[in-house]
Amino acid sequence: MRLLFFISLFTLFLHAQTLLVINSNSDVKKYTEAVDEFSKNFNQPFKILDISHMKSREIKKYLYDEYPDSVYAVGAKAYQYANEYIPEKEIYFSSIADWKKLTMEGKRYGISNELHSGMQLTIVKSIFNNIKTIGVIHSKYTQNIINDLSQDAEVLGIKIIPIKIDEDSVNTIQSEDTVQHSDAMLVIADPVFLNNEKAVENLFRLSKEHKKPVIAYHELFIKYGATLIISADNPTIGRQMASMIESKLNEEPIENIQYPAGTNIILNKREAALIDVEFTPDISSIATEVIE
């Protein structure tokens, strides 16, 4: 009887682990989608904190007062505060562009915001059968992404043509030659390139002039004239994180960093028609959305 009591007490202790979900900004759709789906699928108590309107000292006090056993940080801001104020705790993260830039000391687990480059290129190849070369503008901050793309592209018979820029050269970037000699252009989440509106607009203008499709990672690029969007599915990330944390609590083996399990694929059919680019006739079985 005493043994059963201690077993029950130990089980109760395991389930008493406290979890805090920190949302960097509940007004950001991708964050809220992940948090909402996590909430529906995580089967243990937890608290949610939106830090979008909190000052640093308020966040610090809250974390010290609550002192959770684990944190699920949604977005870079949430991760940075958790990592700074309670670094000794388990921190899970998602919805952060290029997680490899994070300080990852201690117990850190997460879901990459970027899809596996091999999967991304396989989708591109299955939609645009004739693509053999893809141009990509990048800086030193995304060199690791270029390395992964180049390695996986070679297996698929695709060549990546990189254009390396920095804070000075982004204003004078000469991308027309690369656009001309590429079958498509790929936009990645490079901070130097994306922070220069003129450079972004110039890339889309040249691509349209030379009738080359632009592949991007977020639907906001549709307004610039992107032909294909391939992105991680945010609700799936929420469900995936719920499963990840519960597996860890149950002492089941997990991969510390996982790729997103779901994708959103949007084909801008209008843009494809304007630049006269061919795509697979079986597009409805691949794309989650087709813009007519």
Image: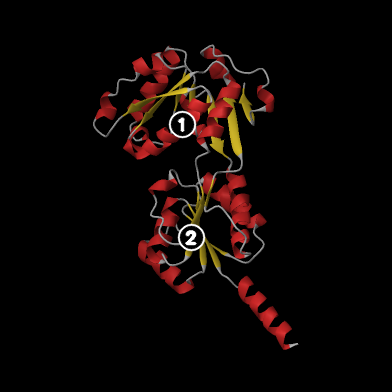
Q: Residue at x 44, y 29 (%)?
A: 150
Q: Is residue 63 above or below residue 166?
A: below
How far is disc 1 from disc 2 in space, using C-alphas?
30 Å
* Residue 171 shows in this picture: yes
Location of residue 250 in the rendering, given as x and y in whole percent from the top left corner: 63, 64
Question: In this view, which residue lies farthest toward the left?
Answer: 168
Location of residue 193 in the rendering, given as x and y in whole percent from the top left corner: 35, 32
Q: Residue at x 50, y 55 (%)?
A: 109
Dot 1, crowdedness within 10 Å: few (<14), some or many (≥20)?
some
Residue 212: mark in rendering: none
Q: Is residue 264 above or below residue 215?
A: below
Describe the element under mark 2 as helix, strand or loop.
Answer: strand
Q: What residue is pinned by disc 1?
A: 151
On-image quarter of the N terminus: bottom right
On-image quarter of the C terminus: top right
- Given residues 76 and 262, the one toward you in this image is 262
Q: What residue is pinned by disc 2?
A: 91
**Residue type, mark 1 in image:** Gln
**Residue type, mark 2 in image:** Ile
For the residues carrying marks 1 and 2, which lies nearer the camera in this image?
1
Q: Is residue 68 above or below residue 273?
A: below
Horizontally, residue 29 falls left or right of residue 209, namely right
